[in-house]
Image (tube, coloured by chain):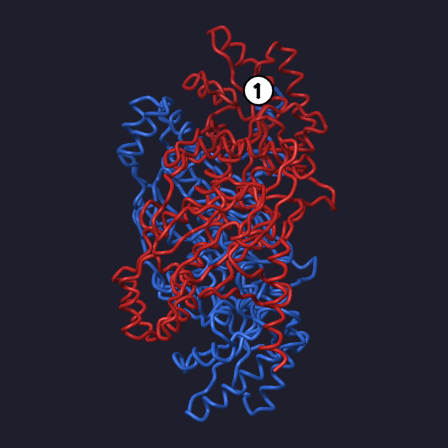
Chain colours: A blue, B red
């Protein structure tokens, strides 16, 4: 996963378009704008992730000899175009919000300005990378918010859409506030805390549940979380209590127990009661099994005594919103602002800036403006690459994590609710200049292209 | 993506369990069984994919020095265990259905028998790989079935959960009957046909739509599919007709037009009428934009004249069913069949075989039996690895694709419906011997573990 990701990861139409641009010598600067059109149900904000990956990929953008031989073999492209591709590097500028920024629908998050063929060829990778990383971060933070300070751990490795997806889920969920991941490779690659103890198979492979519990505690006396639901949760709790007492006699403490199935709401209360009655109030209760932010919120509203949540599949595939409705659209070419009018898929023309207004420490509204306009508010897009070179050093995960933690505090509570009111959306305005430009361009297009 | 995938892609608990097995010298053979518990809504069968990837990974299973240094650094594991991991290779047997096999819920698809620590450590990768590949294949085939012989093309690269996911979607959708992919890297890696022409940005970067159309046709005269909805679909159709006539004068034929937004049902009929009236009945209509099997079926039921469908996001992330409820469960250890009783998550004990009964060329029922039982029907699980070595050569994609095409013909129509009747499920029975064994084991567990 650490090797250079092929620049051939692009839709074929990017290459056929680039071939035409090449033939017609259309190398003037083009600006494409990445944005998300709409919110998944119950979402009111997004967290921007994937920028670092995009920058690294753009820095290394190039076609290998093998790539070019493959393209030649397709019989579609002329030798002169393939020669052009051979020497092609990314030499453009990138304006972007910072990794970990809070953003909203209908506002530009990243804009690339580069000679048209380059800006076109990078589309597929840019969308895929920003979309998936931001999707996962924005989904994962909902579990963190629902857990109200309790520990949340990533358990999704077995159900993500491949290994690469699992790594990104571990990374991004950690960034937005998860404490750890079960994914050992992610732990190694990103230096994220890893966690995990035992599965049902462990219990079953021993002649008895008691022997399984004892064996684990003997070998990991400081790190034992007993899984209780292999046969019967309440009976297993009694076995766990016996073991905890034996550990106490050795000066050790049972770390926790885990519930993974059944009526957890009821069982957790019962398990807590039994543990407390046995003087084991320090033994933590971990819960897992099909959790998401809605289930976590429900448990806490019902007063279920849970200390930590293992959140897997539904977060890792973003089950109720498995994709973002994101686009990367041409907004200007050779100094000319452009737009499309496709039904339901209009785009705002021109190079832009987003200004963020705050009030009493909370986000108040964002304003999407033309890049050359200025307002007395924080501009969110800044130049992160110039002429193909990165302008800022790579941020550490720890820095981004801290930044997100601070940024979350500035989001009004009603936008952070797991089930927000249907009408509460953050205000994203369009500047009068941008609105006027857009109107002018749409009228020009109507005159020139439609009323012919 | 072609590098060896780290064996450290495993949940940490697999390693802590393995450490206990190691300390207790629990190296006897364990059998784990992979199966899917239930169908997503409206699905009635699955297509098994990912086996080849699992076999390749198992063949290369080993921890690198770097992996071991990382594990050592966690401070959890003893040196003797890390030494054991250093020399660990996968030496087990794998019984499996063939890549591309049709399978059903609640039946074992793959069983691994290996020394307990090995069989445990491979769990995370095995589930992830079989789950995701089978998910995508089973989702994609629904678009193929809905399209009733019309061409279907994979357009999902920009919205999948990462690049690896995009490659697997291209591979598996091709296997189940897609004609091509837009994903150039997948085309190169798997030798899948690639396709694509132009996006809205292409139209917008030219001074006018007519000039954009002409430029493309000049450079790709045999491969031009004009995108019609950038400004106004009907006006663009008239421009396309003019261009097609100019191409005819040069002895060339416009290949097609593409509709990507708007009321496609209405627009496609109108575009077809205009093309036909102009004597351009050979010009094909491609449709894309948020398609899935439900939309494809709706178009065809409404008689919308579509020749080919570009299916992207909703197939590529399996939007309405983004994961399979799949498990990899211990079913026997050291010759002793085992089971868990966890509420709603029971497992069938023992090493198994699945027998498939057919009637008049159609699948009739499957029977899940103990592996040593025999029935007068086709056994679906066969040994594909022995003592860690692959028993059969790698199949070509073409062979698997053909196999799936044949296998689909044997599925009764009611199970292939996009909206099947709520009660029509394929019959999967459990053999009397297996049922008796299961009952016996559950009773033993109750006596030993619960009524204590």
Q: Is residue B389 left or right of residue B314?
A: left
Looking at the rendered structure, the secondary structure element under dot 1 is strand
Left or right? Give the position of B390 relative to A200.
Answer: left
Write the residue at 33% across / 74% down.
B77
The residue lying toward the viewer, choosing from B443 and B160, is B443
Residue B219 or residue B48, whichever sits in front: B48
Residue B157 place in picture, x, y as percent: 47, 40
Callout 1 environment at 10 Å: few (<14), some (14 to 19), or many (20+)? some
Can residue B313 be seen in this snapshot? no
The mark total stands at 1
Residue sitting at x 26%, y 33%: A65
Counting from the top left corner in percent of width and height, residue B160 is at 49, 45
Check disc 1 and report the residue beneath it.
B284
- Closer to us: A288 or B77: B77
Figure check: B168 above or below B338: above
Where is residue B184? Give x, y as percent.
40, 34
């Amino acid at each position: 996963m650490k090797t250079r990701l092929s620049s051939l990861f692009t839709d074929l139409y990017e290459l056929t378009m680039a071939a035409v641009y090449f033939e017609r010598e259309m190398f003037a600067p083009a600006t494409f704008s990445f944005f998300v059109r709409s919110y998944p149900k119950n979402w009111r904000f997004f967290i921007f992730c994937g920028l670092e990956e995009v920058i690294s990929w753009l820095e290394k953008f190039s076609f290998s000899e093998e790539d070019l031989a493959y393209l030649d073999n397709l019989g579609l492209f002329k030798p002169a175009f393939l020669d052009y591709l051979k020497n092609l590097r990314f030499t453009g500028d990138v304006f972007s919000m910072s990794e970990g920024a809070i953003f909203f629908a209908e506002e530009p998050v990243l804009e690339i300005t580069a000679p048209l063929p380059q800006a076109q060829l990078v589309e597929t990778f840019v969308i895929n990378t920003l979309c998936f990383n931001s999707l996962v971060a924005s989904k994962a933070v909902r579990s963190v918010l629902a857990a109200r300070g309790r520990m949340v751990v990533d358990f999704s490795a077995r159900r993500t859409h491949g290994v690469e997806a699992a790594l990104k889920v571990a990374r991004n969920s950690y960034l937005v506030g998860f404490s750890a991941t079960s994914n050992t490779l992610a732990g190694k690659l990103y230096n994220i805390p890893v966690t995990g103890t035992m599965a049902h198979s462990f219990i079953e492979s021993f002649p008895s549940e008691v022997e399984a519990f004892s064996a684990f505690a003997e070998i990991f006396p400081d790190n034992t979380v007993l899984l209780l639901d292999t046969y019967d949760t309440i009976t297993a709790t009694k076995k766990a209590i016996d073991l905890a007492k034996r550990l106490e006699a050795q000066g050790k403490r049972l770390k926790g127990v885990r519930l993974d199935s059944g009526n957890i709401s009821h069982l957790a209360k019962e398990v807590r009661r039994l543990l407390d009655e046995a003087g084991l109030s320090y033994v933590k209760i971990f819960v897992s099994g099909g959790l998401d932010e809605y289930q976590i919120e429900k448990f806490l509203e019902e007063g279920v005594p849970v200390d930590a949540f293992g959140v897997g599949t539904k977060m890792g595939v973003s089950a109720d919103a498995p994709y973002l409705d994101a686009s990367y659209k041409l907004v200007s070419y050779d100094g000319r602002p452009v737009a499309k009018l496709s039904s339901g898929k209009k785009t705002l023309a021109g190079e832009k800036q987003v200004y963020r207004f705050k009030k009493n420490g909370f986000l108040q509204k964002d304003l999407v403006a033309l890049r050359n306009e200025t307002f007395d508010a924080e501009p969110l897009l800044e130049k992160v690459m110039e002429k193909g070179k990165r302008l800022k050093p790579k941020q550490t995960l720890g820095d981004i994590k801290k930044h997100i933690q601070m940024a979350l505090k500035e989001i009004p509570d009603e936008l952070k609710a797991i089930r927000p009111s249907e009408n509460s959306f953050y205000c994203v305005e369009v500047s009068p200049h941008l609105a006027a430009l857009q109107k002018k361009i749409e009228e020009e297009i109507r005159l020139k292209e439609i009323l012919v």
